Amino acid sequence: MRRIRLSVARIALICLAHTFWAAPLLAQTPTDADLEALRFYIGEDNEQAIRSEIRRLQLRYPDWTVPEDLTNVRRSVPSETINTIYDQIATADYDGARRTIEQTSQAYPDWSPSAQMLETLALSEAQTRFTEAVDAEEHTTAIRIARSNPSLLRCERVNNAWLMAEQYQALDQNDAAIEVYRGTIRSCIDPDILVATLEKSAAVASLAQLADLANSAREQVPGAAERLSTVEDRLRAGIQAEGRMPSSGARTSVPNGSAPQTSIEVESVPTPTAPQASLRPSMRPQALAPRRTAPLTRAPAPSAGLSEAQRAADRGDWARCLALTANAQDGATLSQRGWCALNSNRPMEALSDFQNAASRAPTEQNRLDSTYGMALAMLRLSMVDQAAAVAARTHFAPPQRLEIERQILDNRGVDAYERRDYRRAIAYFNELERITGVMRRDIALLRGYAYLNSGQKTAARAEFQRLHDQMATPASRNALSEAMR
């Protein structure tokens, strides 16, 4: 038998080659540690070193595909770290949250906290400071904090506005308190909020001021006029004043948007820019979804993850809710995720979540709730015909159906106006007013211009005059001037 003799050098070379080519069998893709050098070169923007390191990694890991966008190679922040930051905010450990943000920024130079995270931190801290100042009867401090943080005065946090008014009252600045109550009434459209605001204002308002506030409340939500008049008469009777009912036929508009999204104007109400008839202004209102935080009914015993997501949604912490439901598979959690995505202005993602939730719904009510969210997401995406088709085949609850039909008519009316089909736009707007009993001021103004552009000057003047009588603004004055030409 022929004997094969191998030199020590050849044996070492074979072993080295075996080690090199066997390595991919153990790990087919680079580990996090393997990518450190590439990340460093990317951060340094050293193209030659990047190309060399990529070639080395491709030889070692033949199955590895180089990302088209090399920034994807950069190390991402673990979700546990993000959760820690939000947990620290939730427990009022604001200094700890800032330290964690700083430490994370140092460990991950390509990461920076999102605007939503910083807003959540700032708002939560401001809320804590405001509450502490109120509890400590530090009236001036509480007022300063509230005025420096307008987000504290959203309608969804209306109790802050009421507390702010009470701080002014404690300082014997009753006129300033009345302005806070007036701003609340002009900004919020929930009848319960309007009633409570009237009741609170009665402690400091004169008869004239109470009458003015009540009129503003009726103009804000005409559908609740009778209830508000009853409250006004009761409050007037409480101070031995004669009851007064408003004149009939008053019609005014509801501000664009939903109450939870509205900030209370404490000192003044902004006036919209007047559209010119010849320019065909685009006044498409945003189809805002209601601030839903959970399905109408939930499956019995929600999972711990779903419960935590619901708590985050209750706080309006949409980013936290989305993070907690990132890998959702069951219908109830997907539906909750859909509402959080919709409130985060991510309608495409919300639509996908609602569609999946509807197909996996654990209860019939959950399916209806998800289908309702699906229709709202479609409207946000201007998929009006698709939303109408969903509404036609779904047995929505009356309030849900009214909201869907309202947005459909709203969108179709604006579409018709922008196509210069003014008569059809008028028909849509009239039907919108008929089914809701309410006409937003911007839509009423648009209807007036539709009258004007279709040659119905008398109707246009009447529309603009009504708006001007309700609240004189540059927009109503300019519109009235246009109609008088």
Image (tube, rainbow, N blue to C red):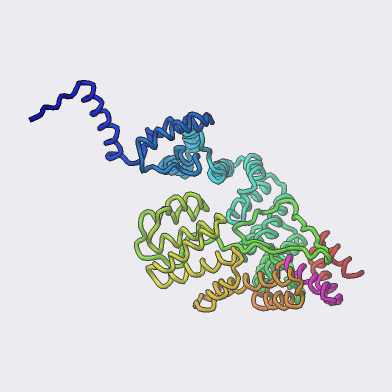
Q: Given the current orientation, which residue lies at the most extreme right position? A: 485
> In the figure, 57 relative to 300: above or below?
above
Residue 233 rendering spot, x and y as whole percentages: 69, 69
Give the dominant element type of the magenta stretch: helix, strand or loop: helix
Q: Examine the image and state in which quarter residue 63 appears.
A: top left
Q: Quadrant of the N terminus?
A: top left
Residue 357 rendering spot, x and y as whole percentages: 43, 65
Residue at image location 36% in from the left, 40% down from the top:
62
Residue at image location 54% in from the left, 72% down from the top:
400
Q: Is residue 212 left or right of 328 when viewed as pictured?
A: right
Residue at image location 47% in from the left, 64% down from the top:
354
Q: Examine the image and state in which quarter residue 346 appears.
A: bottom right
Whether residue 236 is visible, yes or no, is no
> In the figure, 34 relative to 268: above or below?
above
Whether residue 118 is visible, yes or no, is yes
Residue 52 rendering spot, x and y as whole percentages: 45, 31
Residue at image location 74% in from the left, 55% down from the top:
269
Q: Given the current orientation, which residue lies at the most extreme left position? A: 1
As for residue 144 lying within the magenta part, the answer is: no
Q: Given the current orientation, which residue lies at the most extreme top position? A: 8
Q: Which residues are magenta?
A: 442-463
> In the figure, 387 relative to 174: above or below?
below
Q: Which of the two residues, 344 or 85, is positioned nearer the viewer here?
A: 344
Residue 469 rendering spot, x and y as whole percentages: 82, 67
Q: Is residue 183 left or right of 156 when viewed as pictured?
A: right
Q: Which of the two residues, 481 or 455, is positioned nearer the viewer here?
A: 455
